Image: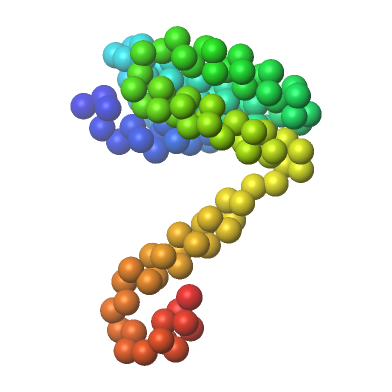
Amino acid sequence: ETFKHLRWAILKSPENLSPEEKTLLQKAFILSEELSQVYQLRKDLKQIFDTDQTIDEARIAIDLWQENASKIDNKSMQVFLKILINWKDKVLNFFQERLSNGLVEGLNNAIRGIIRSPFGFHNFENLERRV
């Protein structure tokens, strides 16, 4: 019962949590030490990206974070670490200009959603207008 409706509380930034969500998270962390550790690692990684630093400083911070994260025996975390290791140079480029392609990815996702639901589109022009 404690883990129901927990997803959005976990995904929110800690400063945006309501008192009820904070209580829900605290209960879940008591029941699952692993969840508590993963949540703390998530907050720590977000802090690295929110801090203004050079690529070299970010590399050191991410390496330390990665070392801490590798100590947790969690399959999803191990998958994430493998991806991070493979793409680390690309990820670190963020610290050069502090730019993200999130907006473009969001637009592409919205367009894909429109294309997947072509109800009412009898011709390409209608689909094009919707996109």
State whether residue 45 is above or below residue 102: above
Q: Position of residue 29 (x, y in %)?
A: 36, 16
* Image quarter hosting the N terminus: top left
Query: Which image quadrant is residue 28 in?
Result: top left
Nearer-the-camera pick, 54 or 24: 54
Query: Which image quadrant is residue 36 in?
Result: top left
Along the horizontal axis of the image, is 130 left or right of 50? left
Along the horizontal axis of the image, is 21 left or right of 119? right
Along the horizontal axis of the image, is 56 left or right of 23? right
Nearer-the-camera pick, 117 or 10: 117
Please tell me which residue is depicted at 62% across the width and 22% down the height of the picture. 62
- Quick one: which residue is furthest to the left in this view? 1
Please tell me which residue is depicted at 41% across the width and 33% down the height of the picture. 9
Query: Which image quadrant is residue 8 in?
Result: top left
Please tell me which residue is depicted at 50% across the width and 20% down the height of the picture. 41
Nearer-the-camera pick, 43 or 111: 111
Q: Is residue 113 visible?
A: yes
Nearer-the-camera pick, 108 or 27: 108
Q: Is residue 15 visible?
A: no
Along the horizontal axis of the image, is 91 left or right of 56? left
Q: How many numbered circles are shown?
A: 0
Query: How is colour applied across the structure in the image?
Result: rainbow
Please tell me which residue is depicted at 52% across the width and 57% down the height of the picture. 106
Q: Position of residue 128 (x, y in %)?
A: 47, 82
Q: Position of residue 89 (x, y in %)?
A: 64, 33
